[in-house]
Amino acid sequence: MSKQRLEAFSDAVIAIIMTIMVLELKVPHGGDLNSLLLVWPTFVIYFLSFAMLGIYWNNHHHMFHAVDRIGGNVLLANMNLLFWLSLIPFATAWVGENHFAQTPTAVYGIVLFLPAIAYRLLVKAILSHHGANEKLRKAIGKDFKGNFSLTCYALAIPLAFVSCWISMGLYVLVALMWFVPDRRIERKL
């Protein structure tokens, strides 16, 4: 399979995930501004989740720019990533419906943590498939942002039972950190 086919499939799946998420947005009951204000948590968490999916899509694109070929292990790792990303609409809806309650906020963190792990496994699969491609290894580097993201998610999950706002702050921090695309690959290649 060509890398273009994998990229096209991944693009389609991420687009479908985003579409499912927007379809979960409920129209407020009532025609005044107060009705809209009652559903603000749904819009806030939707915005964050949409940004997260966009960040994954953007970085996935940048990484595959550096890939010459793919194999079975890369296909499986990519499918693993797409599976975990597909759970984001569920967690987003749950947090929004329950106005950032503790358990949904913790589960949201788990649903963000698992794609981060899956992305790391995808990077490892690509590196193992490319063998001695030093340019690609140097481009990936030590992955400070990836490690920091995993740490933030790991802290935010139990912190949701202390303060949902601290957890949400950590999720937003990760999104802000990744909002600027990861340009390591472009600089090295």
Image (cartoon, helix red, strand yellow):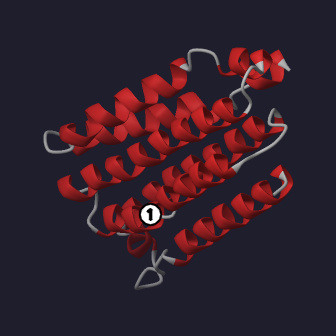
Q: Nearer the viewer, residue 133 or 92?
A: 133
Q: Which residue is mark 1?
A: 87
Residue 165 horizontal side relative to residue 171, left or right: left
Quadrant of res 33:
bottom left
Measured along the vertical axis of the image, is residue 26 above or below residue 36?
A: below
Quadrant of res 187:
top right
Measured along the vertical axis of the image, is residue 151 above or below residue 76?
A: above
Q: Nearer the viewer, residue 90 or 39?
A: 90
Measured along the vertical axis of the image, is residue 180 above or below residue 144?
A: below
Residue 150 horizontal side relative to residue 76, left or right: left
Residue 171 horizontal side relative to residue 143, left or right: left
Residue 161 % position (x, y): 14, 44
Q: Nearer the viewer, residue 89 or 64?
A: 64
Quadrant of res 60:
top right
Quadrant housing the N terminus = bottom right
Which residue, as the protein is rendered here, is positioned at the far left? Answer: 162
Quadrant housing the C terminus = top right
How busy is the neighbourhood of tag 1: few (under 14 within 10 Å), some, or many (20 plus)?
some
Residue 128 % position (x, y): 64, 31
Q: Residue at x 47, y 33 (%)?
A: 174
Whether residue 154 is visible, yes or no, is: yes
Residue 140 % position (x, y): 66, 22
Q: Nearer the viewer, residue 37 or 116?
A: 116
Q: Residue at x 82, y 60 (%)?
A: 5
Q: Residue at x 57, y 49 (%)?
A: 77
- Tell me the amino acid under the disc marked 1: Leu
Measured along the vertical axis of the image, is residue 156 above or below residue 53?
A: above
Q: Residue at x 44, y 63 (%)?
A: 87
Whether residue 50 is visible, yes or no, is: no
**At numbered mark 1, what does the secondary structure look like: helix, strand or loop?**
loop
Residue 58 % position (x, y): 71, 43
